[in-house]
Image (spheres, grey):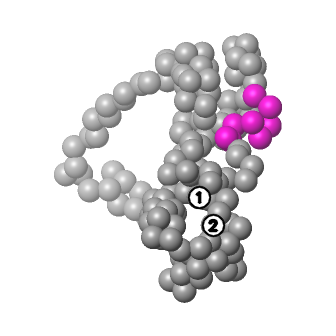
Amino acid sequence: MGSPFYPIPNYFPPANILMISCLSEDPLYKNKFFLQQKYVEERLSCEEIAAQIFSARTTVLKYLKLHNIPIREVGSNTKRVRGLGYGKKIKARNLAEHQREVDAILKMKELREKGYSYWKIADVLSTMKVPTKTRKGRWHARTVQAILLKNG
């Protein structure tokens, strides 16, 4: 009839429990094809895969080794580019165009075709507050010249 502390009314019907069991399926980190797809094809890191399947990074790493999937060196997952050129950026691990910098390059070319010197172009860019690649300092003639020679 219920507890003296928590009286349970008699007018509720008994609860019908529907159990959906997906316990028979193996967790995704045990699936060799899933790990192959994520780690080798999509080049995700163990940490990224673990976050997707709500698991631990070490568990993913363990099963990669168990399935004989070659493990990448630490830090080799990113596409590092030393001295990333003006007009380029890294987006989703791929080299992409930096649109504002590309616009600045077009402006440099336009000014150079009008007969402006590299010093004058550098002064114009500094006056217009166009950021340099490092987002610090001023534009210099040598920098403008190097960018224009590289982007011909």
Examine the rendering and report whether any part of residue 135 can be seen. no
- Find residue 14 and report its image quarter: top left
* Residue at the image position 19 percent from the left and 51 percent from the top: 11
Identify the amino acid type marked 2: Val
Image location of residue 57, percent across then percent down: 70, 38
* Residue at the image position 69 percent from the left and 75 percent from the top: 140
- Find residue 63 and report its image quarter: top right
- Asked whether 101 or 78 is in front, the reply is 101
Residue lying furthest top: 68
* Residue at the image position 60 percent from the left and 35 percent from the top: 44
* Distance from Cα at disc 1 to Cα at disc 2: 6 Å
| Extent of the magenta region | 72-79
Examine the rendering and report whether any part of residue 60 can be seen. yes
Image location of residue 88, percent across then percent down: 57, 53
Residue 144 bears which disc, if any? 2
- Find residue 49 and report its image quarter: top right
Indicate whether 59 appears above or below 91: above
Q: Which residue is mark 1?
A: 148
**Direction from residue 14 to residue 118 in the image, left or right:** right
Image location of residue 132, percent across then percent down: 62, 71
User: Secondary structure beneath disc 1?
Assistant: helix
- Asked whether 140 or 28 is in front, the reply is 140
